[in-house]
Image (cartoon, rainbow, N blue to C red):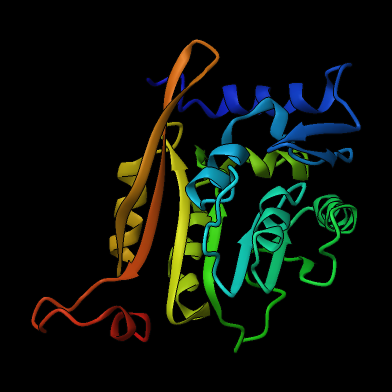
Amino acid sequence: MSHIRSHLKSLERSNRSLTRPDRPREFRLLDRNWELLDEVFAPLYSPSTRIGAEFLGLTGAGSSNPPSSLLEIGCGTGVIAVQAALRGCASVVATDINGHAVENTRRNAERHGVAGRVTALRSDLFSALGPDARFDQVFWSSNYVMAPADYAYRSVHERAYVDAGYRTHRRYLSEVVHHLTDDGTALLHFSARGNLGALREIAEECGRELHTLDSRTVDEGLDPVEHLLLEIRPARDRRQPAGTRRDLARV
C-alpha cells in the first residue's frame, strides 16, 4: 500500500492529467456534458468526483433531499456544486484556490442553468468568506495524499493532488465547524491514498472527532483504493454528558 500513498506517484498523475495529448475540452459524467478548462483537475482521470457525488446522493434518478445551503471546497470543474443545485439545493457556494477552476465552475453552472444558485469564489479554504457565513453542509473532496512539509508546489494544479504536511487538512478540521448552521454537517472525502492515522492525530490535536459515514472501494489502475466519507464534529468533553448535534455544532 505504500506506493498508493506516494506523493511522487500522485505528482506524476497530476502531470499526466495536464499534459496528455487526448485531454478533452469537454467530458461526460453523471449523464451530463461538462466543460474542462486547462489547469483544472480532470474528473475523467480519477474516480473521486463521481464517488463524492455518490456520497452526497447526487447521482441516479431519485431525490436526494439536498441541504438548503452547501459550501463545496475545491470545486474544480463544478460537477458537485452544479449537481447539488440541480437536485434542489437553494444556495451553493463553490470555492477553489485555482482561479481556472472557479471560472470552470461558473461556466458549467451557466451551461446547466443554475448560475443563479451557484456562486463560485477563488478562496484558500474559507479565506474569501465572511466570518458569519454559515452553511447546512460543507463538503471537501480533499487532496488527501500527504507530501513532505517542505514540498514546494510547481503549479496550482498539484494542490489538487497533494497536501504538503497536511497543513490544509489541519486548517479545514480546525475551521470548518465555525461555518456550520446549528444543525449543519462538515464532511470530508478521504481515501486510502491518504494517511488516515495522521489525519486522526491532527483531528485530536484540533479538538475534533472523525466519524465514518460511508465507504466504498474502487479499482484505480491495478490498485483497489478505499474511499471514505468522514463527518467532522467537535470533540465532546468527556466530563460532560453527551449533547445533541445542535449543542456540538456550537462548540
Q: Residue 115 location in percent, x, y?
A: 85, 66
Residue at the far bottom in the pictured view: 132
Q: Residue at x 88, y 55 (%)?
A: 103
Describe residue 110's horizontal placement relative to residue 70 as left or right.
Answer: right
Picture mark count: 0
Describe residue 237's horizontal placement relative to residue 93 as left or right.
Answer: left
Q: Is 198 in front, or is 176?
A: 176
Q: Residue at x 89, y 41 (%)?
A: 37
Above or below residue 118? Residue 244 is: below
Corner quadrant of residue 69: bottom right
Q: Can see residue 152?
A: no
Describe residue 204's horizontal placement relative to residue 166 as left or right.
Answer: left
Q: Is 246 in front, or is 68?
A: 68
Above or below residue 81? Residue 250 is: below
Q: Residue at x 62, y 40 (%)?
A: 49
**Image quadrant where one finds the C terminus:** bottom left
Describe residue 82's horizontal placement relative to residue 56 as left or right.
Answer: right
Q: Residue 17 location in percent, x, y?
A: 76, 26
Q: Can see residue 248?
A: yes
**Image quadrant where one finds the N terminus:** top left
Q: Residue 156 location in percent, x, y?
A: 76, 45
Q: Residue at x 36, y 46 (%)?
A: 214
Residue at the far top in the pictured view: 222
Corner quadrant of residue 132: bottom right
Above or below residue 140? Residue 149 is: above
Residue at the far front in the pictured view: 62
Q: Residue 180 location in percent, x, y?
A: 49, 78
Corner quadrant of residue 245: bottom left
